[in-house]
Image (spheres, helix red, strand yellow):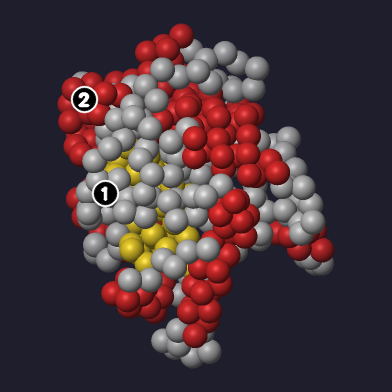
Amino acid sequence: MRNVMRNGSQQQLAGMSRREFTKALGLGVAAGALGGGGLFSAAAHASVPTGLITKAIPRTGELVPAIGLGTYLTWDVLPGAPRDHIREILRRFWDGGGRVVDTSPLYGTGEISVGDFATSLGIADKLFITNKIWSTGEFLADDSHARRSLEQSMQRLWRDRIDVMQVHSLVNVDPMLAILRGWKQEGRIRYLGVTHHELPYFPALAQYVEKGAVDFVQVHYSIHTRLAEERILPAAAERGVAVQVNMPFEKARLFKVVEGRPLPDFAKEIGVDNWAQFFLKWVISHPAITCAIPATSNPEHQAQNIGALKGPLPDGEMRARMVKHMEGIPGFDKLAGMAPYPGKSYNGIIRRAQSQRAPAR
């Protein structure tokens, strides 16, 4: 499957003027002078610094900053190992206006790190937490495993309510959505959703969006992998579903492609200072996108990421120009075949378990 945008979709975005493109964002974006006030999350009591890009959750109009924080692998550390860098990442994220943090019980010690450092920074009840659940049960419709997972997440995160709970990778999705609806009625979660990052599952993911069965969908989307534009993003816009983007950096492979290369001169027009902001602004400028959740284990990289909340967003014409520039860089078309996380090493309990697995015969 080729990871390319279809011509119609690309032409539609490219043909929009800056004014038309910004209008298409509707209440979903407040940039520059609009600031970060308004209907921002009831869970995030502290105000967002002014002048940042925010997007609206379609079902409620609640505003969240358009750059969040992912925690897969990057926040998973072995018990007893140094993790002061994680606290610094969260501090810089918060100080820069970030509020949305995404995690999962499957992310090793990531969930624990979020809870520990959010508590120590005094922001545990102020973050907008999006979490996931991967559960079946002892029998069909048994919710005992799911409830234990929810209670464990609440204890780790030091929260009495989770903002968004999503069915992780569509595992046991139909029974789990019924359970999540019950939790929403009970007030244990505020929104429910579904997630996946693998392209073959996009048609299945799209069905839940098209039915309007969820408040949120989390999907793989980047300047390289644009398949979500064919079905998921249009359905989300039509059905009023918030879109959270995972893998906006393609597991660091985009940085490998542009390694040693300067930004194009036109990047100055959208207030971009580094490649991270180039890739993130492209993602969050799509009208259907609510929030991107890049992950990092480096505080300096976090400072770059959160900087994408400032300055103008690219319009349709600029988005097309950005794609064209990337398509002219050698290796961009081969990105999908590259090993993930080039030049990076993560040493948490996930990697330890993976290294201890017996090799396949």
Q: Amino acid at mark 2?
A: Met
Q: Quadrant of residue 14?
A: top left
Kind of residue at disc 1: Glu
Question: Circle 2 sits on which residue?
Answer: 16
Image location (x, y in percent) of residue 315: 29, 24
- Write down the quadrant of residue 174 in the picture: bottom left
Q: Give the Cα separation between the discs numbered 2 and 1.
A: 26 Å
Residue 81 image label: none
Give the image location of residue 79, x and y in percent: 76, 59
Foreground residue among 276 and 2: 276
**Residue located 38% across and 71% down the image:** 188
Q: Is residue 308 left or right of residue 19?
A: right
Taking the spot 57% from the left edge, 13% from the top edge, the residue there is: 262
Residue 350 image offset from top left, x and y in percent: 70, 59
Q: Residues within 10 Å of mark 2 (few under 14, many from 20)?
A: some
Q: Quadrant of residue 304?
A: top right
Residue contact at pointers 2 and 1, CB within 8 angstroms? no
Residue 136 coordinates in the image, percent (x, y): 50, 80
Number of marks drawn? 2
Q: Residue at x 22, y 54 (%)?
A: 60
Q: Looking at the image, which is closer to me, 346 or 209?
A: 346
Which residue occupies the extreme bottom position in the image? Answer: 139
- In the picture, measured across the screen, residue 315 lies left or right of residue 153, that is left
Mark 1, residue position: 62
